[in-house]
Image: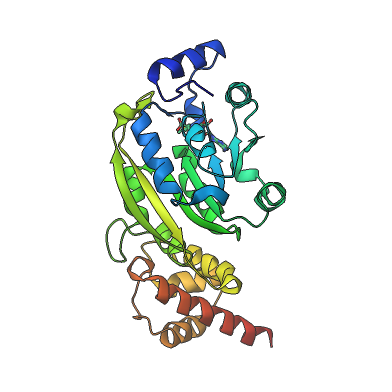
């Protein structure tokens, strides 16, 4: 493929020949800066990525996709927009390591769709994510149970800062705590609105989420615990424990004591280990209730 999709001129020509106008409802801000696309592709994949499989969410016109297909063994992309799918099919015709799913990524059955293509390969994710579904996309990937090694995503800078925030800071929230069990997140670099067409109102940032070893059996309960304890952010852990998990005040106090949490703590001050201990104690109490 000889066209340079991240050139603003080529992107505009592609859109006009397929009758495409950027759709706000799908968070379409196309990357029209080749250097940034190179930096994302380089950060997404390791040096010896020859055998790697890549998932891309929202390939758009294919600017990042183009760089991924030349670096990885397989690339599977999910695109919701029919107009873009038409254009991608033509652009990537004959590119044998590229599979395109015309589908809402949030509804995709990743295991079923990707195992036949990827086999046992290490999986990397690269995306310029649609901003309106940043958190659900990241959580779907992190919690997927797939053999994902690293997730490299461009998102709103403010959201990236929230994901990387430390407990007790203003930005720290359920997404930071939820990801922390599965992965280590760090911000790589900021990206100016002028790198996109159309220009978004805010700065973006590229985030690298390095998956770590985690106890898969405990993962589901951990995620439930984080959601439950952040249900009412201003309330204490005790109050959220009672409401979200239908516990008595005695049971909530016992969990707090055994997990060695300050009795007036709120979720926004807890770290990953605190959530993990509380999560275990919730399971213990629930077992006791059943017996
Ligand atoms: N990757 C392209 C780029 O960098 O220029 C496009 C990025 S644009 C910010 C987000 C892309 O995600 C668009 O192509 C949009 O149509 C697509 N998209 C939006 N919602 C989606 C969903 N639920 N599932 C799959 N793709 C989606």
Residue 163: % across, % down: 37, 55
Residue 22: % across, % down: 48, 22
Say if residue 52 shows up in the picture.
Answer: no
Residue drawn 43% across the image and 64% down it = 180
Q: For residue 35, which quarter of the picture? A: top left
In front of the other: 62 or 248: 62
Say if residue 7 shows up in the picture.
Answer: yes
Residue drawn 47% across the image and 41% down it = 127
In front of the other: 40 or 70: 70
Above or below, 284 against 145 in this view is: below
In front of the other: 104 or 151: 151
In front of the other: 25 or 290: 25
- Horizontal side of 211 relative to 35 (left or right) equals right
Residue drawn 40% across the image and 21% down it = 7
Above or below, 137 against 213 in this view is: above
Above or below, 136 against 274 in this view is: above
Above or below, 242 against 1 in this view is: below
Residue 51: % across, % down: 57, 51
């Amino acid at each position: 493929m000889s066209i340079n999709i991240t050139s603003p001129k080529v992107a505009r020509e592609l859109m006009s020949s397929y009758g495409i106008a950027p759709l706000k409802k799908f968070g379409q801000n196309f990357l029209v800066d080749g250097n940034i696309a190179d930096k994302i592709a380089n950060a997404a994949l390791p040096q010896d990525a020859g055998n790697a499989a890549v998932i891309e969410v929202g390939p758009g016109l294919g600017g990042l996709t183009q760089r991924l297909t030349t670096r990885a063994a397989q690339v599977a992309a999910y695109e919701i927009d029919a107009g873009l799918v038409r254009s991608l099919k033509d652009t990537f015709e004959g590119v044998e390591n590229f599979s395109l799913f015309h589908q809402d990524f949030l509804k995709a059955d990743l295991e079923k769709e990707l195992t036949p293509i990827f086999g046992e390969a290490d999986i990397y994710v690269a995306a310029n994510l649609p901003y309106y579904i940043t958190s659900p996309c990241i959580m779907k990937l992190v919690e997927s149970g797939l053999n994902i090694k690293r997730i490299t995503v461009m998102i709103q800078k403010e959201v990236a800062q929230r994901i990387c925030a430390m407990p007790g800071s203003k930005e720290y929230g359920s997404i930071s705590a939820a990801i922390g069990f599965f992965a280590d997140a760090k911000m790589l670099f900021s990206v100016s609105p002028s790198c996109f067409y159309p220009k978004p109102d805010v700065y973006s940032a590229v985030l690298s989420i390095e998956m770590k070893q985690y106890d898969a059996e405990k993962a589901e309960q951990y995620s439930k615990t984080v959601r439950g304890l952040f249900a009412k952010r201003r309330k204490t852990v005790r109050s959220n424990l009672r409401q979200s998990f239908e516990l008595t005040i005695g049971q909530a106090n016992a969990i707090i004591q055994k997990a060695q949490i300050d009795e007036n703590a709120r979720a926004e001050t807890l770290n990953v280990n605190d959530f993990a201990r509380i999560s275990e104690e919730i399971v213990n109490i629930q077992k006791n209730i059943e017996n």
